[in-house]
Amino acid sequence: MRRTTLFLTAILVGVSAYAGYKWTESFNGFEVDKATALIPPDEIHSGGPPRDGIPSIDEPRFLSTGDKGAPEGKARVLGLVHNGVAKAYPVSIMNWHEIVNDRFDGSAVVVTYCPLCGSGVAYDAHINGKDVTFGVSGLLYNSDVLLYDRQSESLWSQIMSRAVAGPMTGKRLKMLPLIQTTWEEWHNRYPDSLVLSRDTGYSRDYGQDPYAGYEDSHGVWFPVKHKDRRYHPKERVLGVEVDGQFKAYPFAELSQTSGRLADEVAGKQLVVHFDDASNSARVTDTQGNEFPAIMSFWFAWYAFHPDTGVFTVD
């Protein structure tokens, strides 16, 4: 009887310990709890560099438009107007750093760029009442950069705009209306805009594209969960989300329009503006206010949103 009691006690202790055990896996030093993560841990891939191997820019310096060192006219930039301040971030710099922790008139903002997905997204970095700074984890999901915040060390998916692992799992970031365009087009719209300087504190050849040829190729370097062959994998699309509904506007379709398209997504009236000269697009509401959207490669948008609506020309 005593042996039976001891045996049952051992089983109960084992079951209790098992129930309380967290099945975690480590990626670049980040612990991912398999039970709570919003993405499958086996779909997280190392991009090669370690954590912070691609250094974020934490003390950005800026030039005025007339200063020596400003970009050439056709250079690609990420443009953002926030709190009445306009700033441009050359893609030639973002290719090497992917994240800029910045401030707009005192407000914390993080500007992100994933060269593998061609996706630039800016977020309000004031979370849970605190300013948060981000770094590059060196990890990818659906070939897209996973950011991490230095305060909680949670992992955040750029295109999902939310924390996918760590203490902040499920927390969403507020997207700001970032625009990808040419410096010439941005400067014409915002002549007083500041532009990120190459004086970053790091030794990088910003005149060299570390991803040269990638955008024109069909190849995707890392696994993605969903694929669709309707367009070239690197076809540029503008993607919007309204109340959990997604829609993509491929540039191949927009180029066949007048450049201004009125549309409705989840009951919201939107206007898509396409500029063929600068190969750029943006979205506004019917009052002309900029609406947050993500410009990315087609393969990346579809990998995250296989149920996306797609605008096509009749």
Image: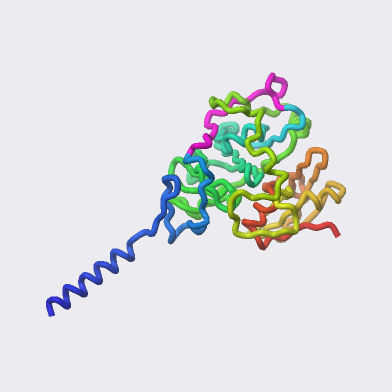
**Any part of residue 263 in sight:** yes
Name the residue at 76% across, 47% down.
287
Which secondary structure type mostly characterizes the magenta part of the structure? loop
227 displayed left or right of 264? left
* Residue at x 75%, y 55% (from the top left corner): 231
- Looking at the picture, does residue 74 appear above or below residue 34? above
Name the foreground residue: 226 vs 212: 212
* Residue at the image point whose x is 61% and y is 49% from the top: 221
Magenta stretch: includes residue 164: no
Q: Report whether residue 84 is seen.
A: no
- The residue lying toward the viewer, choosing from 87 and 269, is 87
Residue at the outermost top position:
68
Residue 10, given in percent of the width and then of the height, sits at: 21, 70
* Residue 70 is covered by the magenta coloring: yes
User: Would residue 311 be found to the left or right of residue 153 on screen?
Assistant: right
Count of picture labels: 0
Is 133 or 139 nearer to us in this picture?
A: 139
Q: Residue at x 84, y 46 (%)?
A: 259
In the image, residue 216 lies at what x, y percent?
Answer: 72, 44
Q: Tell me the quarter of the image containing the C terminus.
A: bottom right
Could you say which quadrant of the image residue 113 lies in? top right
From the top left corner, tell me how far across and down residue 76 is, in percent.
Answer: 71, 35
* Residue that sits furthest to the bottom in the current view: 1
- In the image, 295 versus 169, the foreground residue is 295
**Residue 1 falls in image quadrant:** bottom left
Residue span colored magenta: 52-71
